Image (cartoon, grey):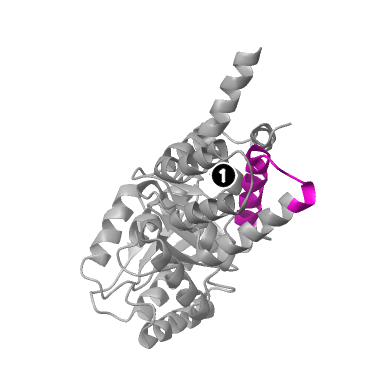
Amino acid sequence: MSFFKRLKESIASKTEAVTSKFRDGLAKTRDAFVGKVEELFTRRKKIDEEFFEELEEILIGADVGVNTVMGLIDDLRAEVKKRKIEQPSELQPILSEKLVNMLKGTDESPDLNSNPNGITVILFVGVNGVGKTTTIGKLAWRYKQQGKKVLLAAGDTFRAGAIEQLQVWGERVGVDVIKQESGSDPAAVMFDAAVAAKQRNVDVLICDTAGRLQNKVNLMEELSKIHRVIQREISGAPHETLLVLDATTGQNALQQAKLFGEKSGVTGLVLTKLDGTAKGGIVIAIRNELSLPVKFVGLGEKMDDLEPFDADQFVHALFAGMAGDEKAEDTETK
């Protein structure tokens, strides 16, 4: 059974609508990355050093990351030797499966952590301009669709317009926003939000934070203070600290993830604007080089275009064109 048929069976239980979102959202990456991979595997008639060098160049060009690419190429070399593979076509499904395994890592479930005994608190961090506030609004909408009672906290009190932007999203999705004046102490906002969440018996409290440069000591101290305030009011909080990254920034996103992950207690990642970049390989680099799971990906501008990350669907969407070609070939041979 081919890789694509096995992959299709593995995601058979998932809705076609979600699969379409991944396929459509990854169109730019698929055209730039997978098109070149397919061309290489078709053009090259044997696996030699030049083949591996070209593949390496394609992967790095898709922002898969140098360290990740080096390890992947070494693994593929080992597989070729072990299985005595000579034709590139035989290596293609092995490459796909290795990408799936990289994306899955050791985490079986990308689900958000929750508080089974009360309010779930989700803290959002990330630099300005990555789509943090928009992501908060979309996540609030997702929870609302699940029948959850949601409250937002406008903790980014320094960026001009940040409070107003979150307020607009709150109105769009029908969720209240706890806020103070611009320039207020973010920790004070979080205290008010935690108290309000308990008084109103909400299910989920989603907190925005300032998005200044991630290597500034005062920002990290601010995040630590926010953590302490929330923990005093709600046991075990925050239950998730999600770092939002702009996928279109490529390697810069990876550097941000490394800096934030080291200093702010990040538990998961959200990659936005994945539909707007041809370098979606950055997802692979980030997942492979950091011990942090990708929880959500942004695949468009609509309210419901924030999707839980799924490694199988990600790779299936990338290689959708090849899968389609295979299906066509199967039909022709009948």
Q: Amino acid at mark 1?
A: Val
Question: In this view of the protein, which residue sits in the foreground, 227 or 250?
Answer: 250
Instruction: List the residue tagged with mark 1.
Output: 315
> Which residue corresponds to the image point at 52% horizontal and 42% vertical from the top-left?
40
Task: Tell me, yes or no, if residue 52 can be seen here.
Answer: yes
> Which residue corresponds to the image point at 32% horizontal and 76% vertical from the top-left?
212
Query: Residue 141 at what x, y percent from top left?
Result: 41, 48
Task: Tell me, yes or no, if residue 199 can be seen here.
Answer: no
Within-10-Å neighbours for mark 1: few <14, some 14–19, many 20+: many
Magenta residues: mostly which secondary structure? helix
> Which residue corresponds to the image point at 61% horizontal and 44% vertical from the top-left?
312
Above or below, 190 against 316 in this view is below
Query: Residue 295 at what x, y percent from top left?
Result: 53, 57
Span of residues in magenta: 81-104
Q: Quadrant of the C terminus?
A: top right
Q: Assess whether residue 155 is covered by the magenta stretch.
A: no
Query: Residue 246 at what x, y percent from top left?
Result: 38, 60
Query: Residue 201 at what x, y percent from top left?
Result: 49, 61
Question: In this view of the protein, which residue sits in the foreground, 123 or 108?
Answer: 108
